[in-house]
Amino acid sequence: MILSAVHRLFPAFLVCLVCSSTVLAQNKLEPPNPLVSEPIDLSQEESLANSVKAGTSRAQAQLIDTLAKLELVNSYRDNAVKRINLIESAGLRIDAKTGQLLRQQRAHLPTAFLLKRQLNQVNVDITNAEITLLDLTNTDDSSQIDSAKKSLEALYKEYIITLGELANVTRHTLAATNSYANYLDERLLWITSAKRINAGEFQTELNAVTNLFSSKTLGQLFKGLRNDISEHPLIWTIVILPLILFFSSKKRIKYALEKLAAKACQRNCLSISPSLIALILTLLRSQTLPLFLVFIAWRSSAPISWSVGFLAAAQSISLLSFLHALSSQHGLLDAHFETAKAKTKLLYFHTTWALFSIPVFLFLAYALPAAGTIPAGRISFIIAMLLCTYFAHSLLNPKKRLLAREQTPNWLLKLLYFLGVITPVIFIVGYALGYLASVQTLLDHTVSSIIVVSLTYLFARLCSRWILISRRLYAKHHARKKYEALKAEKSNDSTNEVPSLEEIEANEVNIQAVEIQTRHIIRFLTVITIMFALWNIWSPVLPALTALDNVSIVNASHHSTDSASSETPSASQDSNPVNTITNTVTPSDDSSFFSSGLSVGDVIAAILIIVFTIVAARNLPGLLELSILRKLNLRPGGNYAITTISRYIVIATGLLAAFSSVGVTWGSVKWLAAAVTLGIGFGLQEIFANFVAGLIILFERPVRLGDIVTIGDVSGRVTQIKIRATTIKQFNNRELLVPNKEFITGQLINWSLCDNILRFEVSVGIAYGSDTKKATEILEDLVSKHPHVLEDPAPDILFQGFGASSLDFMLRGFVNHYEFLLPTQSELHYQIDAAFREANIEIAFPQTDIHIKSLPAKASEKE
C-alpha cells in the first residue's frame, strides 16, 4: 500500500522538484532593493539615509561592473572586426585558430537575459526613488525637519542620478552584446574547428576508447560518485528511492496502461482522462533513465568526459525512448489515437534497435573529445549519423506511409523523407571536413526541432481525441434532450424549461460541420506553432532568417531613435534628477503613417496575422461548441449570440494586431478615425445604427435564432442575425432581410420569446332555436380529445351572446408551439362542422326577413 502511494506521488514530486529548482535558478540575481515607495517618516532620518547610501553604493558597484562588461564587449568587437576585415579583404577564409578564438569570445559574452533583468530592476528602482523624492518635496516644511528633508533630498537625487547612469550603461551593454553575438553567429557557422578526417583517426579513436574505459578512468568516476554520495546522502536518497520504486512498479505501470487502453477503446468512453493518465505514465516510463543519466552527469565531478557523454546520450535516449513507449502495445498510438497496427509495429521495431545503438555512439562522439583527444570522436559520430540515416529511411520512406494520412499530400511525404535522410548526411560531410562545432550546433537545434514537432504532433492528436470525446458527449446530451422533450410532449408538459422536440431539432448543431471546423483550426494552430517554434530555434543560428527585418519598404520619418542610440554612455547631463531615466528616446512624430518604418518582415507578419484571423473567425464556432457551449444549458439562440460576438472580437483583435505589426499607431490613423466619425454623422448613420442594433439584439436578445416573429405584416422564423440585417424566412419559404434597427425601434411580435404556449380561438354561431347545452357539450368533447390542445391551461367554451342571426359561441384553447396554431384551428373547424351536422344543429348564416305590406296592382291581378 505504501509503495503504491509513493508511486502515485512520484510524478507530482518530480514536478515540484523541477519547479522549485527553476524558481531558485531564476531568482539567483541581485537582492531586492529595499528602497520602495512608502510613506516618508522623517523621524527615522538616519535609517532612511543609510538605506539610500547603501542603494547608491550598490548601484555604483553595478555601474562599474557593467562598464567593465561594455568595455570588454567593445574590445572584443573591435579586434574581431579588424581581423575579419583584414582576412576577407585579402580574399582568404577565416582559419580554425581564429574561429576558436571567436568561439571563446562568444562564450565569454555577458548574458543578455541577466542584462535585461538588471535593466528592468533599475527602471523599477528609479520609479520608486522618484515617487519617494516627490513625497519628500510635498512634505510640509518645519524648522525641526527642514534640514533632515534637504539632506534626504540630496541623497535621493544622487541615488537617482546613479541609477540613470546604470540604466544607460546597461542598455548600451545589452545592445552591444546582441550586436556582437549576431555578428559572430553569422560567421562562426562556416568556420572549421579541426582538420579534415584522415585514416589515422581510426587508431586514435580506438586508443581513446580504450583510455575512456580503462580501470583508471572508471576508478576516478566511481570514486567521485562514492565521495559525492558520502557528502550528500540526502540528495542521492531523494533520487534513488523513487528510482527503486519505479523499477519495482514497472509491471503495475504496464498493467495500468493496459486497463487505460481497454477503457479508451470502448465506444462509450466519454472522458479524455484515460488518455491524459496514459500520457503521464508514458512520460514516467520513458524519461526515468534519461533523467537519471542527467543526474549522474551533474553529480560526477571527474572525469568530465563521462559527464559530457552522459548528457549527449540522455538527450537521444529521451527522444527515442518516448517514441518507443508511444508505439508499444497498449500505448497511446495504438489504443488512444487509433493508429494502424502496421504503423505502430514499424515504429516500435525501429526505435528498439535505435535505442540500443545510436545513444552509445553519440556518447563516444561527445565523451572522447572531452577527454582531451580533440580529433577523437569523429568516427563514432559518423557511425551514429549513418544509423540515423537508416532510421530516417526506414520510417520516413513514402512507401512505408508511416506519416501518411487521408489528406496528407504525397509531395509533403517526399519532402520529409528527403530532409530526414539528407540532414544526417550533411552532418557526416561537415564532421569529416572539420566543421565540428558548427555540426554540433546544428545537431542540437535539429534535435530541438524534432522534439518540438513531436510534442506539437502529440498535442494535435490529443486534441483529435478530445474532439471524438466531445462528439460522443454532444450526441449523448442531444439524445437526452430529445427524450425529455418526447416525455414532456406525451405528458403535455409545455413549460419553457423543457424545449419542444421541434425546437431541439431546429437548433440542432451539425456536429460533422462543427468537427470539421474544429479540426481545421487545430491543424492551423499546429502548423503556426511549429513554424514559430522552428523560427525561434533556428534564427539565432542562422541570422539570414532575420534578414527580412532589415529590408525596408518605408523608412521612418524621424531620426530620434538613431541619434539616441548613437550616444555614448556618460554621466547624466540633466540637472533635474527626476528626468534622469534611461536616456529615453524622443517621442516619434505622429505625422508619419508608419511610426517606425516598414520592412518586409513586418508585412509578412501582418499577412500571417490576417490569415490566422480569417481562419480563427471561420472556425471559432466549432471550437466553442465542442469546448464550452455544449456544457452550457442556453436557450435557443444563445449559442449563436456567443459565437457571433466572439467572431467580432477575434476580427477586431486580429486587425489591431496586424496594424500594430506594421507600425500603424493610433496617432497615425486619428485622421482616419475623424473621417469615419464624420461619415457616421452623415451618410453612414443608418449603417452604424443597424450595426449597434445588431449588437443590442445579440446582447439583449429580444429576437433569437429560431424565434417566430411578426414585424409589420410579415411573419416567419429568424434564421440569421448578422452585423447589418436579420434574415426572416417566411412561411411561403421566401427570405426577407430586415434591417436590425427595425427590431429595436419598431413594433415587433415575438411569438416564442418567453413562452411557446399560444392561445387559439374558434368562433361558431348556431341558429336560433338550437339546443345550446348540447352544442356546448359537443365543443367540449372535441377540444378535449384533440391531441395538440393542452389540458393545462384548460380550454373553455363561452356563450358570447345573441347575434343578429346566430347564437354566438367562442371556443378557446392552448397549444404548446406556434406551428400547431393554424393546423389545430383548421382541424377543429372540420370536426365542429361534422359534429353539428350529425347532431342536427344548424350553423347559422346571415339571414334577412322581408315583410311585404302591399303589392302592385298588376301583381295582384295575376294572382
Image (cartoon, rainbow, N blue to C red):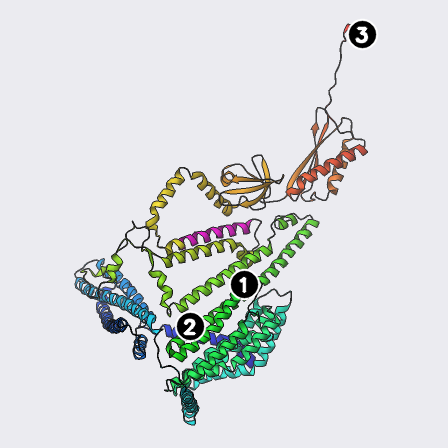
Q: Which residue lies furthest to the front in this view?
A: 91
Please state the horizontal and vertical placement of residue 131, each as a whole percent of the image. Answer: 27, 60
Please state the horizontal and vertical placement of residue 758, each as a whole percent of the image. Answer: 64, 41
Which quadrant of the rendered structure holds the C terminus?
top right
Under tag 3, what secondary structure? Answer: helix
> Quadrant location of residue 783?
top right
Q: Can residue 104 be seen in this view?
A: yes
* Numbered label tally: 3
Q: CA separation, marks 3 and 2?
A: 125 Å
Q: Name the residue under label 1.
A: 409
Three-letter code for the amino acid on which mark 2 is drawn:
His
Magenta-colored span: 634-657
The mark that comes first in sequence, 3 or 2, is: 2
Question: Which mark is nearer the camera, 3 or 2?
Answer: 2
Q: Residue furthest bottom?
A: 215
Return the residue nearer the eye: 386 or 178.
386
* Residue 668 higher or lower than 582, as above or below: above
Residue 860 circle label: 3
Q: Name the residue under label 2.
A: 445
The mark that comes first in sequence, 1 or 3, is: 1
Residue at horizontal 41%, vertical 93%? 216
**Residue neighbourhood size for the residue with mark 1, other residues' Cα within 10 Å, grouped as few (<14), some (14–19), many (≥20):** few
**Residue neighbourhood size for the residue with mark 3, other residues' Cα within 10 Å, grouped as few (<14), some (14–19), many (≥20):** few
**Residue neighbourhood size for the residue with mark 2, other residues' Cα within 10 Å, grouped as few (<14), some (14–19), many (≥20):** some
Q: CA separation, marks 1 and 2?
A: 27 Å
Three-letter code for the amino acid on which mark 3 is drawn:
Ser
Question: Which mark is nearer the camera, 1 or 3?
Answer: 1
Please state the horizontal and vertical placement of residue 624, each as a whole percent of the image. Answer: 53, 56
The mark that comes first in sequence, 1 or 2, is: 1
Return the residue nearer the eye: 87 or 537.
87
